[in-house]
Image (cartoon, rainbow, N blue to C red):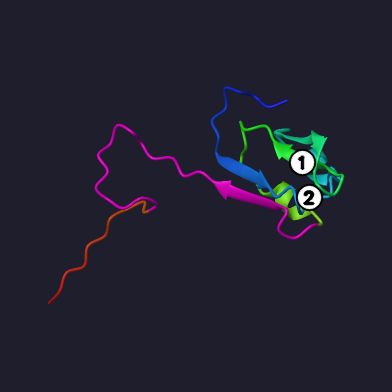
């Protein structure tokens, strides 16, 4: 099971209408944060679900999934909360251009 002390480096989302419940992502997930849902989707499949903690955003679940669009993996970019933010979100460094 997932280590709750590890910070989330990513987030995984499953489209329940696309997932067929094959379980390949469950078996392939290194931190073991994907399970098969007990509830059935509208097609009668037990779909994969993210436990909500400790995703590393490695993307292995996305790569092994045979259903295009069933799994989306997003990487979380941490920002230091104690440093002043003078740049736009998602930009690591601020660069300046000098004109002649």
Q: Residue at x 71, y 52 (%)?
A: 62
Asked if marks 1 and 2 touch (Cβ < 8 Å), the reply is yes
The residue located at (57%, 27%) in the rendering is 6
Q: Which SS does the magenta portion mostly show?
A: loop
Residue 30 lies, in percent from the top left, at: 73, 37
Inter-mark Cα distance, 1 to 2: 7 Å
Query: Where does label 1 land, which residue?
Result: 48
Say whether residue 71 is magenta: yes
Image quadrant for the C terminus? bottom left
Q: Is residue 87 above or below residue 47?
A: below
- The residue carrying mark 2 is 19
Q: Position of residue 40 (x, y in %)?
A: 82, 39
Between 94 and 48, the one lying in front of the other is 48
> Where does residue 1 sit, x and y in percent of width and height?
73, 25
Instruction: Kindly state the secondary structure of the residue where label 1 is placed.
Output: strand
Asked if the magenta segment contains residue 61, the reply would be no
Outermost residue, bottom direction? 100
**Left or right of 80 in this view: 37:** right
Q: Earlier in the sequence, mark 1 or mark 2?
A: 2
Nearer to the camera, 8 or 69? 69
Per the rendered image, the range of residues in magenta is 67-90
Residue 29 image position (x, y, % from top left):
74, 39
Badge 2 density bin: few <14, some 14–19, many ≥20, Cα 10 Å: many
Q: Nearer the viewer, residue 91 or 100?
A: 91
Q: Residue at x 81, y 47 (%)?
A: 42
């Amino acid at each position: 099971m997932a280590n709750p002390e590890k910070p989330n480096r990513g987030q995984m989302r499953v489209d329940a209408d696309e997932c067929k419940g094959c379980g390949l992502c469950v078996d392939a997930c290194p931190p073991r944060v994907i399970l098969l849902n007990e509830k059935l989707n509208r097609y009668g499949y037990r779909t994969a679900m993210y436990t909500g903690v400790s995703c590393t955003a490695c993307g292995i679940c996305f790569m092994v999934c045979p259903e295009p669009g069933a799994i989306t993996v997003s990487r979380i970019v941490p920002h230091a909360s104690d440093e002043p933010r003078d740049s736009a979100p998602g930009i690591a460094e601020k660069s300046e251009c000098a004109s002649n």
